[in-house]
Image: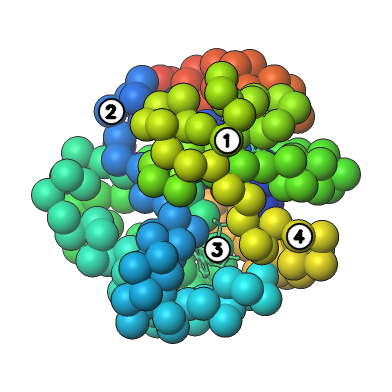
């Protein structure tokens, strides 16, 4: 099974992916996490992505698509991936279809998690992330058991530098201009499911699992 989770920054894609990957045994492929890991290690990929990420812009397709193709060629991806933050424009969506098609696979479902803008801003301004395993927390809606420490791995929590108000506004603009058109792309292929993401985390997860378990 290959699934795309679509949604604006802060919609809860990473949060839901963490829950679903365990339930459905899928590999979580989050391009933002891959870029941040590369940046932390100061690899050439990370340095290429840095200036785009700081501005809230998309990293060029060539770089992003190559990174994803390398990731999905790894053996753990054989039985399926949960794509989070990718594809983010039509070029990426088509490149993903082509790559999966060459392996005799396809995207089975694209789940669009819908959340109003004011709630996105509230979520992003209170988001904390684990430096080691990337698990997201929120200081109000899903705080860690111990402040500043990841429940899962004990890693240090930090706030992303691109979760500031100015960059968040830019990222939302980019989402509406470049990513929203791919919602229609999956709709036309009859692969789109829309979920109300403006409910608590467990309700969204329940709905998401229902949708994915219904895939024939
Ligand atoms: P995305 O991966 O789509 O950018 P995240 O999963 O990182 O979003 O979630 C953004 C923030 O919102 C995090 O702080 C997370 O804990 C919080 N969050 C996620 N889902 C919900 C929800 N359903 N209700 C309230 N807060 C949520
Ligand atoms: P995210 O963690 O998904 O919010 O992504 C953080 C940043 O990484 C984005 O603002 C982009 O700069 C970059 N990025 C992540 N995924 C992609 C993608 N599919 N295409 C281009 N840039 C991306």
Mark 3 or mark 4: whose residue is earlier in sequence = 3
Disc 2 versus disc 1: nearer the observer? 1
Q: Residue at x 42, y 70 (%)?
A: 39
Q: Where 188 falls versus 206 (above or below)?
A: below
Instruction: Please state the horizontal and vertical placement of residue 110, each as a whole percent of the image.
Output: 50, 43
The disc, 4 or 2, on the residue closer to the chain's N-terminal end is 2
**Residue 164, disc:** 4
Q: Is residue 101 left or right of residue 170?
A: left
Q: CA distance from mark 2 to mark 3?
A: 24 Å
- Mark 2 highlights which residue? 25
Residue drawn at the location 53% of the way across and 69% of the way down = 90
Note whether 183 is above or below 140 in the view shown.
below
Give the Cα distance between marks 2 and 1.
Answer: 29 Å
Asked if marks 2 and 3 touch (Cβ < 8 Å), the reply is: no
Residue 84 in the image, given as x and y percentages of width and height: 47, 49
Label 1 – label 4 distance at C-alpha: 19 Å
Observer-nearest of 40 and 3: 40
Quadrant location of ligand 1? top right
Q: Secondary structure at mark 3?
A: loop
What residue is pinned by disc 1? Answer: 148
Label 1 packing within 10 angstroms: few (<14), some (14-19), many (20+): some
- Mark drawn on residue 3: none
Whole-number angstrom distance, CA of label 3 to CA of label 1: 31 Å
Q: Secondary structure under badge 1?
A: loop
Question: Residue 26 appears at what percent x and percent y?
Answer: 30, 35
**Image spot of residue 137 (x, y percent):** 60, 34
Q: Earlier in the sequence, mark 1 or mark 4?
A: 1
* Front position among marks 1 and 4: 1
| Res. 176 visible in picture | no
Identify the residue under disc 3.
88
The quadrant the N terminus occupies is top left
């Amino acid at each position: 099974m290959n699934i795309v989770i679509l949604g604006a920054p802060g919609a809860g894609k990473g949060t839901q992916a963490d829950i679903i990957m365990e339930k459905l045994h899928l590999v979580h492929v989050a391009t933002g996490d891959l870029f941040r890991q590369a940046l932390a290690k100061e690899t050439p990929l990370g340095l290429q992505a840095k200036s785009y990420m700081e501005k809230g812009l998309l990293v060029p397709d060539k770089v992003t698509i190559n990174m994803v193709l390398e990731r999905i060629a790894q053996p753990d991806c054989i039985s399926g991936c949960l794509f989070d933050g990718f594809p983010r424009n039509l070029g990426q969506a088509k490149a993903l279809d082509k790559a999966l098609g060459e392996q005799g696979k396809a995207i089975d479902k694209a789940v669009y998690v819908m959340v109003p803008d004011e709630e996105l801003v509230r979520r992003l301004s209170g988001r904390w992330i684990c430096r080691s395993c990337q698990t997201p927390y929120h200081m109000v809606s899903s705080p860690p058991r111990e402040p500043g420490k990841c429940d899962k791995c004990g890693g240090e929590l930090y706030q992303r530098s691109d979760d500031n108000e100015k960059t968040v506004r830019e990222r939302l603009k980019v989402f509406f201009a470049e990513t929203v058109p791919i919602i229609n792309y999956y709709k036309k292929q009859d692969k789109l499911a829309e979920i109300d993401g403006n409910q608590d985390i467990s309700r969204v997860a329940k709905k998401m699992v229902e949708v994915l378990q219904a895939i024939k």
